[in-house]
Image (cartoon, helix red, strand yellow):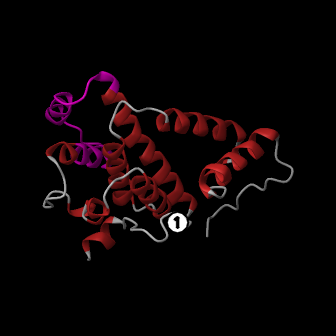
């Protein structure tokens, strides 16, 4: 159960009610992270604009972004992000086999060299402190132009924002990946 109760639609302004309805139309229900952030209208607006801009960008292959974001969520241990991210990844065509082996990507034959490079970048960005070396960035630049580097980097950074915020708020999974495979947090994934 979340540490803050969701802001209730009754009595909320038009913008927040619209936000709740849009999520319900897109995903079948309002989303708890949005409802918690809705306690601060200005931050909800910024959060929504950044999320929409990132979701609407397509310079980087969607599967690569989903894998990178799920890896960040897995390292942080955000149950909500793993649930929702697993749903989005599989809905976009990411094979379940890759999701099952995400924690073991270095030793798995499921991942291409480019996917391994992107996962290495996601891990380096998610570490505290961040450990992105010039060498790692240069290897990425062999595959991605400036626009793609910005999109990939921002996607991973946003996942860090989402995962760390949801973790702090105590927001748990909501069953988005029910009936499909859901990536597990790092410690649980390695115990398999």
Picture residue at 37% right of the left edge, 48% below the top: 66
Residue 181's place in the image compared with 138, above or below, is: below
The residue beneath circle 1 is: 173
Q: Does the magenta stretch include residue 138?
A: yes
Q: What residue is rendered at 49% in x and 49% in y?
A: 162
Q: Give the range drawn in magenta.
A: 118-147
Q: Which residue shows up at 46% across the image and 71% down it? A: 179
- Indicate left or right for 69 with 50 as reference: left
The answer to which of 39 and 101 lies nearer the viewer is: 101
Report if residue 87 lies within the magenta region.
no
Residue at (35, 43) in percent of width and height:
65
Residue 9 left/right relative to 145: right
Looking at the picture, how far across and down is residue 82, in whole percent?
43, 60
Give residue 14's position: percent from left, percent from top.
81, 40
Relative vertical location of residue 44 with respect to residue 102 in this rendering, above or below: above
In which quadrant will I find the N terminus? bottom right
Residue 189 position within the rendered picture, expressed as x and y whole percent measured from the top left? 30, 70
């Amino acid at each position: 159960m979340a540490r803050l109760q969701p802001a209730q639609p009754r009595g909320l302004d038009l913008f927040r009610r619209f936000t709740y309805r849009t999520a319900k139309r897109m995903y079948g229900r309002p989303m708890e992270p949005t409802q918690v952030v809705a306690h601060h209208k200005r931050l909800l607006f910024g959060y929504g604009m950044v999320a929409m801009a990132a979701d609407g960008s397509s310079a980087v292959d969607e599967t690569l972004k989903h894998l990178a974001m799920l890896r960040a969520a897995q390292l942080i241990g955000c149950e909500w992000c793993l649930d929702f991210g697993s749903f989005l990844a599989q809905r976009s065509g990411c094979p379940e086999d890759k999701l099952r082996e995400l924690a073991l990507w270095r030793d798995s034959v499921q991942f291409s060299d480019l996917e391994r490079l992107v996962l290495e970048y996601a891990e380096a960005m998610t570490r505290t402190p961040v450990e992105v070396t010039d060498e790692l960035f240069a290897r990425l630049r062999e595959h991605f132009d400036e626009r793609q580097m910005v999109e990939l980097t921002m996607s991973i950074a946003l996942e860090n924002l989402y995962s760390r915020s949801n973790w702090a708020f105590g927001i748990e999974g909501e069953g988005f990946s029910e009936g499909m495979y859901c990536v597990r947090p790092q410690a649980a994934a390695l115990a398999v």
